[in-house]
Structure formats: C-alpha cells, structure tokens
Image: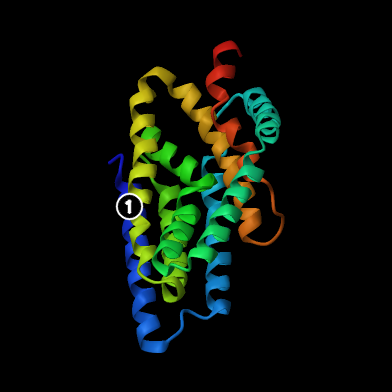
Amino acid sequence: MILTGTLVNAAGVLAGGGVGLALHKLMHRGIPERYSALVMKGIGLCTVYIAFSHLLDGSKTLVTILSMVLGAIIGEWLDLDGKLKRLGEVLERKLSKSGGSFAQGFLSATLLFCVGTMTITGSLESGLLQQHSILYAKATMDTIAALIFASSLGMGVLFSSVPVLFYQGGIALLASVAKPYLGDAVIAEMNTVGSLLLFGLSLDLLDIKHLPLMNYLPAMFLPILFCTFL
C-alpha cells in the first residue's frame, strides 16, 4: 500500500518512455507539442481538484499561516529554488559537452521526475495516509514527459524510473516510520500545507502564475513544530 503510488509512477515512466522510443523509430518524431501542452493543462486542472480535496484537512488556521510564512522565509534564505535551477544549469552544461545521449536522457529525466513539490507531497501522502492521488497525477504527467523526452533523448529516459522508485519510495517509507510519532493532528496540518503548495503548482501548470515553490517546501514540515505549542 505504501509504495503503490511510487510503483505506478515508475511504471508510467517506463511506459511513456517505451512509447516515445517506438514513436521515434516509426515516425522520427515525438508527440506534437500542441497536444502535449493541451494535456498538461488538463493535468493542471486535475491538480486544482486534488489540492482542494485535501485543503481543509487541517483545523488550525494559525499553524497553516505560520508554516507558510516561516517556511517561505527559510526557503528564500536557503535559496532552494535558485540552487535547483543552478543544479539544472550545471548538468545541462556538462551534458552538452559530453554529448552522450544516454547520460543526457537519464540525468535530465531524473532531475525532472525526482525534484519538485509533487514528489515530496505525494510521497508524504503515500507514507502518512496510504493515499496516492498526488502520485497518480504525477505519474500521468511523468508518463507524458517521458514519452516526449524518450522520442528525442533515447533509452536513458527509461532508466530514470530507477531513481524515481528509490527516491520517492524512500521518502514514503521514512514517512510511514515517522507516522506513529506525529499524530493525526500534525499529519492533517501537513496535508493542508502540502495542498496549498499543490495549488501553487496548478497555477504554474495552467500558465497563470509561476511561483518559486521550492522556497516554500520547508513549510511542509513546520506543522510538526507549531502543533506542539499551538
């Protein structure tokens, strides 16, 4: 149960990558951009639904506000969003010099699939609540992305399913181990904050507003502190 969402996600990467490779061989091109963009907008709307379905899990509004405010300050101080972007730029430069299509496909896809708001919130949801709606939505998005990537970058994209399996599965398992020490109230507040971050992601997917969501990520864990005192 705990790893169901992660297994579906990894399987989606394999399936999408396999279809992308087949399309490349048959058509010498991947899925047209206008179709993939339209589908991603649909996924953005589904993300809105997922976010609102869990938004009222918590009952302590003050905990949510303090977590988001202090989490944003910590994330901005650590420059998490900037560090992520610089990591991507470094990998891109190194891969462009090496010219290895397998390595480029593997590392580019791994960075896309393993780093982000949905990865953390979805894995925590799986581990803490044994629910997988977030990772199911992420699996759909990753399947489409793997199809597009594999059609141009090749076999390396399929192997990115291995880091997805271990990274997301590891977070989910660690969350399940920590669950008895958190309590239902803390988990509910963490779920509310995570839902706010997912709503921010949906704004990005729908091209409404881009937010540096990685800088808000520390807010996910602050209800553990605030629920102790509030």
Asked whether 10 or 137 is in front, the reply is: 10
Image quarter where the C terminus lies is top right
SS class, disc 1: helix
Q: Considering only vertical position in the picture, is 224 above or below 48?
A: above
Amino acid carrying label 1: it is Val
Residue 144 placement, left or right of 8:
right
Residue with the most extreme front position: 97
Image quarter where the N terminus lies is top left
Residue 139 placement: quadrant: bottom left
Q: Considering only vertical position in the picture, is 144 above or below 67?
A: below
* Residue found at x 40% / y 81%: 24
Asked whether 35 or 87 is in front, the reply is: 87
Residue that carries the numbered disc 1 in the rendered image: 162
* Residue found at x 35% / y 37%: 170
Position of residue 160 measured from the top left corner of the image (x, y, whole percent): 38, 57
* Residue found at x 50% / y 29%: 188
Residue 207 placement: quadrant: bottom right
| Label 1 crowd (10 A; few <14 / some 14-19 / many >=20) | some
Position of residue 156 measured from the top left corner of the image (x, y, whole percent): 37, 64
